[in-house]
Image (cartoon, grey):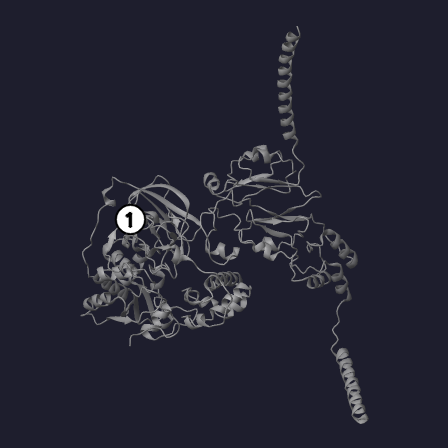
Amino acid sequence: MLKTFPIGGIHPPENKLTSSKSIKRLPVPKVVNVPISQHIGIPAEIVVSVKDKVEIGQVIAKSGGFVSSNIHSPVAGTITKLDKIIDTSGYKKQCIVIRTDVKNEANFEEIEYPLKKEIELTPKEIVQRIHDYGIVGLGGATFPSHVKLNVREGVKLDCLIVNGVECEPYLTADHRLMLEKSEEIVVGIQILMKALQIDKAIIGIENNKKDAIDAFKKVTKNLDKIQVAALQVKYPQGGEKQLVRAILNREVPKNGLPLDVGVVVNNVGTIFAIYEAIQHNKPLIERVVTVTGKKVENASNFWVKIGTPIKDLITEVGGLPEGTRKIVNGGPMMGKAIKNTDVPVTKGTSGILVVSEDEASRGEPENCIRCGECVFVCPMGLEPHLLMNLSEKGLFERASNEDIMTCIECGSCSYVCPSNRPLLDFIRFGKNIVKKLETSKN
Amino acid sequence: MTDSVLYSVLLLVSLGVISAVVLYIVSKKFYVYENPLIAEVEELLPAANCAGCGSPGCKSFAEKLVNTEDISNLFCPVGGNDVMKKVAAKLGKEVSEKEPTVAVLRCQGSCDVRPKTTEFQGPRTCAISSMIYSGETDCQYGCLGDGDCVKVCKFDAMYMDETTGLPVIITDKCTSCGACVEECPRDIIEMRPRNKKDLKVFVGCLNEDKGGIAKKACSVACIGCSKCIDACPKDAIIIENTLAYIDPVLCTLCRKCVPVCPTNSIIETNFPPRKEKKVEKKVEAKVETKVAEKVEAKVEPVNSKMDA
């Protein structure tokens, strides 16, 4: 019996249409719009001005605090303006607009780095470089990685969990990366183990990616410190807390972090970015993005420069199919519909999903029939129907007491609700207000 | 038969007497003294329980009025100066007079001037729409049109206009309690002074985008062109982030800024029709009469020739 987390979870149709499509390099965009707030925490501070010439990988915005991250230029070119552009949040946010220098050959070089296994840096240097090179969690939450690795003294760590679950339907970015760069990822894991001074790492992969499991088993055959754990297919297994529970059978305390049970969790994409930063001095300027959808002609996985407008990706897969209703940034469960196709790809964009008319409709919400399905599927053991009612009626203090803040916004409750109730919308709203109330109290 | 009637009557009477005695003792023993003034002041208040004063209801506001010494910064927006004067007379304290205000909607983005570019299928409340994204139009500052303000209005002073998709404030019913101002996630509703005829001049836009972008999203958006500043004789207009704001204190309601606005984003309410327009019409009328005279003049000689 394969491992999984014990409570809740759902089985949405997988629809991994692009799992056999190798990662292609997207043509270098003419213009990139790089938002200065691509991570959780304080936005970065712009250090360039209009008409400046920038090189690939040059710092264009410096981290604005401890929980913040540097941002590097993804192309060589000229800064044309510092403007506000609609990003994935739906609001206009400060962006650095860079026009690619077409004559500069550096933009079009396709560097294939050779595998480099020796780790020369000391743990402190590794963490510093992860900070300098703007690495953030690429699983979607975009939490600055150096913060995770800056472990306070006295905290005992014993295991690094590598998140290769990719439980979101449709997305295959991590899956392809694991297949194509498995050796590099294993070196990346060793780098992190050195930085954290722990000697156990477990790679968690869901059983629907058997080829990736085999690939890692092959690479780690002679490394007994790194294990591969095959997991049952269940959404949302990619959530940190669910993954720790599934692999190590340890319960992360509510409002706590995996750190509290001696674990650090990192996504495979992040680990590959760390490998490139440490071994090849490459900052985080591109990432793998799955562009998919049932009616999309050439759905595939791409290496995309940060800041590339989403319309470039859509042109590459053959344009918008007829009857497109929504374009979602991310997967169908946790992703967010975008406002227009000028929205840039950021460090947190793992996929672009083109949804057609028949898949997009949400259905008329009806009355709650008290079936309890939402309670049954909630992976955090919450009562979504109650939380929704509390935030709808403005009883935020009670919602806070009912642990509304522990909700991971996986959307399982809204997915199963037979009455089409907008559970997650209201819970998110309640979380927002509770967060504001808590910060105003402090 | 008679016995059972007698017993039950006796039982009920004795129960009644015992309860009366118990209640009497309890009411004496646990008597809570309340200043009779509180009830009297509460009588004077409008009993709307709207929380516009900052207290949860009229009773608690009455307690506050009675128990605080200096009530000059307490004000009941619903009752206004009249009620506050009565309260002051009753309590022998001084109150400050406040200019009456009324809520105004600082957005004119109806469906025809501000086209929808996206569609939202989630729950229709402004709070959620504004949290999830910037609304169905390209303007991220304007009205979301889901009517949270209408829902919180306790005086039926607001309704949603279905043709424009914007809320409408019925100024006669508005008590300026401020519930809508508090509720609006975009801060579109503003309290502005209300005079006898309810004359108001204000900028009906909050779009801080650059002119071109704002105009593209909404044809009546303020583009920050500063023409109104030049027209204003009292320096009552400020432009910040390419958005004009008319200071209600400095503004003398001369309306000179209204016609110069190239996007018609300055709103005037309840003013009599403009004199200038009449002048224009007169000029046109004169021209017409002149033409007519000329025609007549031309005609006449012909006629005279004919006669001849």
| Residue A1 horizontal/vertical position (percent) | 29, 77
| Residue A175 horizontal/vertical position (percent) | 27, 62
Q: Which residue is mark 1?
A: A316
Outermost residue on the top side: it is: B308
Specify whether residue A66 is in view. no
| Pick the front one: A87 or B108 | B108
| A178 to B205, vertically: above or below | below
Specify whether residue A95 is in view. yes
| Residue A135 horizontal/vertical position (percent) | 32, 57
Outermost residue on the front side: it is: B307
| Residue A82 horizontal/vertical position (percent) | 39, 43
Look at the image and tell me in which quarter the N terminus of chain B lies: bottom right
| B158 to B234, vertically: above or below | below
Q: Chain of mark 1?
A: A
Q: Secondary structure at mark 1?
A: helix
At a point 37% along the width and 55% down the height, the residue shown is: A355
Q: How many marks?
A: 1
Instruction: Name the residue type under label 1.
Output: Glu
At a point 19% along the width and 58% down the height, the residue shown is: A115
Q: Is residue A389 left or right of residue A337?
A: right
| Pick the front one: B80 or A274 | B80
Look at the image and tell me in which quarter the C terminus of chain B lies: top right
| A33 to B35, vertically: above or below | above
Mark 1: few/some/many CA within 10 Å (<14, 14-19, 20+):
some
Q: Is residue B152 left or right of residue B68?
A: left
| Pick the front one: B277 or B22 | B277
| Pick the front one: A339 or A398 | A339
Q: Is residue A246 left or right of residue B111?
A: left
